[in-house]
Image (cartoon, helix red, strand yellow):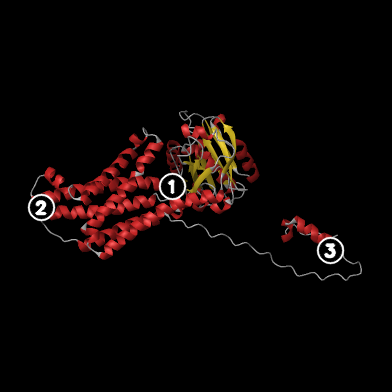
């Protein structure tokens, strides 16, 4: 009787192993035994190359470096003068080229380039986009006002007559329309206004950014700052063409290609608690997406009432057996419709996005802190982050035991990994705050030696970040992504 070691390469092929055992015992009895072949070392599969990630510091350096290059390039063409009209014109030209560069940066930040999304994080990109948008609008309006004052001073006329004269030039009229479109987008993106608009309306208005940027580009080609030099004209055109290609590729081509290739469909919808469901989806070759625990996709379910909106939800379990799972809490019309999805519904998934992944880890010990439905990415990380007994701890904040989501799974993971798991229950207005600095130190005595991953509602996330820093965790080791839909 011969046996094979458990780590034999044939152990993964039981049918082949059985066949070889059978043929080895069925030979001629007088035949001499065959000499044993020397063992061959098993081939190791080549590890996939890690995804390219652009760090936040590198992104900031690139943006500021580009702005400096634009100023230097403009400076070579500037003609200094003390005349009032020339001073106004000089300010108009500088603010104009910076506004054009700023529009390109804003479009690049929202192009969903994987290296940027995975390195910087979608929430940080959104905040940077919102902050940069204010500067760009200020530059656009400043450019228009300075140009108007410069023309009025040069022509020795009033501002109203100067406005009428300038709008008679087609290039300037197009620039005025483009600026108006960008202002409209900026006004509807203000927090007070956006809360009152349906998400679909806000997205439709936001698409005007592309038209406004295109009209601004046409205006820049007619101006002396770009058209005055062949080199400047070529560089400016190449920058716009590059950003346009990135937008089309990552926002249109890649999602369509993924949809056709992976053929993702709803497999099951399961109740997880009051107003919370998990949606299990199955496709083809989903490992090629290289989705990491902690990341999210933008999901478009092809059924009435949902197909026109891309919903951002994190994976609530690692990718396995060509299945993806999300866990959704009903907080609006669209999320309430998710619980009524039927088996077989076609799904378009764009992504993965987000930087709340294992690559941010810098310490052996990790604390995962979740609030509400923010448990979804934390659950996936809780299962997959490498670590020995006691290295991984999960704190889950909820109003009551009934609001805990995926509790049984979390407890099973904690038992299997010998990891820490604490449910922090109670109303948010209670006299005792379970995420106060001292309370956190009581639960995790060596808290300052941990990396902390944080996900929850904006208010809870801000409070928890402050508490963690006061408890001794350096702010750079608090890794968070926070979204509102």
Check the image and report above or below for 365 versus 19.
above
Numbered disc 3: secondary structure: helix
For the image, the number of numbered tags is 3
User: Which of the two labelled residues, at mark 1 and mark 2, occupies the earlier sequence position?
Assistant: 1
> Looking at the image, which residue is at 32% across and 42% down?
185
Q: Where is residue 421 in the image (x, y as percent from the top left)?
A: 58, 40
Left or right of residue 63, residue 87 in this image: left
Residue 462 in view (yes/no): yes
Numbered disc 1: secondary structure: helix
Numbered disc 2: secondary structure: helix
> Looking at the image, which residue is at 57% across and 43% down?
265
The residue beneath circle 2 is: 154
The residue beneath circle 1 is: 122
Q: Where is residue 204 in the image (x, y as percent from the top left)?
A: 37, 40
The residue beneath circle 3 is: 24
CB under 8 Å between discs 1 and 2: no
- As measured in the structure, the alpha-carbon distance from the residue carrying label 2 to the one carrying label 3 is 101 Å
Check the image and report above or below for 363 versus 397.
below
- Camera-near label (3 vs 1) is 3
- As measured in the structure, the alpha-carbon distance from the residue carrying label 1 to the one carrying label 2 is 47 Å
Check the image and report above or below for 161 versus 240.
above
User: Which of the two labelled residues, at mark 2 and mark 3, occupies the earlier sequence position?
Assistant: 3
**Mark 3 crowd level (few <14, some 14–19, many ≥20, 10 Å Cα):** few
> Looking at the image, which residue is at 42% across and 45% down?
123
């Amino acid at each position: 009787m011969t046996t094979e070691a458990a780590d034999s390469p044939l152990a993964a092929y039981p049918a082949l192993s059985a066949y070889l055992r059978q043929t080895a015992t069925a030979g001629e009895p007088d035949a001499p035994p065959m000499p044993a072949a020397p063992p061959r070392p098993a081939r190791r599969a080549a590890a996939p190359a890690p995804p390219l990630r652009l760090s936040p510091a590198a992104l900031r350096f690139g943006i500021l470096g580009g702005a400096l290059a634009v100023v230097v390039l403009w400076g070579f063409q500037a003609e200094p003068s003390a005349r009032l009209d020339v001073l106004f014109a000089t300010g108009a030209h500088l603010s104009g080229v910076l506004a054009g560069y700023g529009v390109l940066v804003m479009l690049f930040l929202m192009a969903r380039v994987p290296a940027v999304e995975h390195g910087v994080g979608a929430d940080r990109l959104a905040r940077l986009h919102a902050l940069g948008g204010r500067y760009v609008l200020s530059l656009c309006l400043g450019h228009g006002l300075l140009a108007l004052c410069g023309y009025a001073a040069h022509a020795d006329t009033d501002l109203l007559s100067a406005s009428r004269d300038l709008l008679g030039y087609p290039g300037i009229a197009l620039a005025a329309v483009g600026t108006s479109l960008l202002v409209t987008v900026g006004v509807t993106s203000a927090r007070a206004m956006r809360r009152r608009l349906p998400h679909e309306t806000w997205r439709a208005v936001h698409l005007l950014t592309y038209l406004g940027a295109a009209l601004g580009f046409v205006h820049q080609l007619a101006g002396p700052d770009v058209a005055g030099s062949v080199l400047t004209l070529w560089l400016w055109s190449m920058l716009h063409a590059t950003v346009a290609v990135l937008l089309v590729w990552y926002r249109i081509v890649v999602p369509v290609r993924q949809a056709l290739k992976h053929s993702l469909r709803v497999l099951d919808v399961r109740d997880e608690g009051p107003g919370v469901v998990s949606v299990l989806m199955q496709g083809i070759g989903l490992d090629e997406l290289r989705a990491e625990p902690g990341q999210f996709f933008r999901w478009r379910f092809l059924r009435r009432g949902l197909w026109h909106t891309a919903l951002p939800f994190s994976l609530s379990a690692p990718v396995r057996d060509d299945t993806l799972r999300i866990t959704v809490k009903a907080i609006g019309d669209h999320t309430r419709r998710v619980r009524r999805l039927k088996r077989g519904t076609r799904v378009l998934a764009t992504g993965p996005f987000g930087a709340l992944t294992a690559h941010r880890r810098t310490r052996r010990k990790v604390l995962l802190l979740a609030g509400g439905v923010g448990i979804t990415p934390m659950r996936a990380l809780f299962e997959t982050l490498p670590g020995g007994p006691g290295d991984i701890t999960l704190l889950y904040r909820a109003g009551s035991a009934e609001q805990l989501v995926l509790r049984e799974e979390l407890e099973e993971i904690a038992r299997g990994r010998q990891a820490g798991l604490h449910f922090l229950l109670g109303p948010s207005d209670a006299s005792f705050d379970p995420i106060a600095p001292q309370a956190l130190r009581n639960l995790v005595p060596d808290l300052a030696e941990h990396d902390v991953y944080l996900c929850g509602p904006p208010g809870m996330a801000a409070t928890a970040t402050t508490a963690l820093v006061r408890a001794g965790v350096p702010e750079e080791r608090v890794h968070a992504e926070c979204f509102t839909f």
